[in-house]
Amino acid sequence: MQYLLAGLGNPGTQYEHTRHNAGFMVLDHAARQWGAEWKAWQNLGVYAKVFVAGCDVFLIKPSTYMNESGRAVSSLARFYKIPPQNCLVCFDDVSLNVGKLRIRKNGSAGGQKGMKSVIEQLGTQEIARLRVGIGPKPEKFDLANFVLSNFPKADVLLLEESLNRAVEALEVFLKDGIEKAMNRFN
């Protein structure tokens, strides 16, 4: 069985620690724990292949910026013939507080432009997703400025804990399926 885990974010050191890169952070955390090595993927991002929970698992971080994330995800999925139901996309969610996770089996993009791109490129909403809380957004903050800001020091411990739980959730998804991951981590 093959799976694809995608982390959404923006490439470049200026975005590395921003809230919008929570999806990249989850995959970087998983890659470190699983001993994965990143390699270039068709000028669309970086990917790694690991063996986890008895499965071949591909990780991908698009370098196409958030709004075009689907190009890299669909390219890898099609090349390795991984169906959408074996894909899971990790991304930030401003409506969830820092430290919170939400896993869903499918659904709309919910305003997240990277997920919208993935849905459009794969041609279905039947894609699992792991949303990582980055909120709440203060009232006076512009949304774009907020998601492109770094996490404050006060949130770093909560973020680290949520990244550890996110990797656990990915492992449960791979081993036991989306329903068990939802029941355990939502």
Image: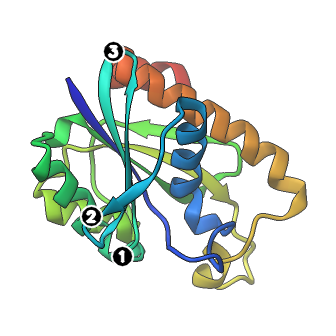
Dot 3: element = loop
Residue 106 spot, x, y in % from top left: 27, 42
Q: Is residue 58 left or right of residue 138?
A: left
Nearest the camera: 31 or 85?
31
Q: Nearer the viewer, residue 46 or 100?
A: 46
Against 18, residue 87 (above or below) is: above
x 34%, y 25%: residue: 178
Q: Where is residue 183 in the image (x, y as percent from the top left)?
A: 46, 20
- In the picture, the disc for residue 54 is 3
**Amino acid type for the residue under numbered disc 3:** Gly
Percent across and percent down for residue 144 are: 58, 82
- Density class for disc 3 (Cα within 10 Å; few <14, some 14-19, many ≥20) is few
- Residue drawn at (62%, 31%) of the image: 165
Mark 1 surroundings: few (<14), some (14-19) or many (≥20) residues within 10 A: some
- Closest to the observer, 1 or 184: 1
* Mark closest to the chain's N terminus, 2 or 3: 3
Residue depicted at 48% across the width and 45% down the height = 37
Q: In this orientation, does residue 186 appear? A: no
Q: Name the residue under label 2.
A: 72
Per the rendering, the mark at residue 151 is none
- Which residue, given by chain and number where applicable, does mark 1 sit on? 64
Element class at badge 1: loop
Image marks 2 and 1: residues in contact by CB distance under 8 Å: yes
Say whether disc 2 or disc 1 marks the residue closer to the N-terminus: 1
From mark 2 to mark 1, how far is it between C-alphas? 7 Å
Q: Given the image, on which type of amino acid does mark 1 rest?
A: Thr
Q: Is residue 174 something one can see in this rendering? A: yes
108 to the left or right of 30: left
Q: Nearer the viewer, residue 79 or 20?
A: 79
Q: Earlier in the sequence, mark 1 or mark 3?
A: 3
- Marks 1/3: CA–CA distance: 31 Å
Callout 2 secondary element = helix
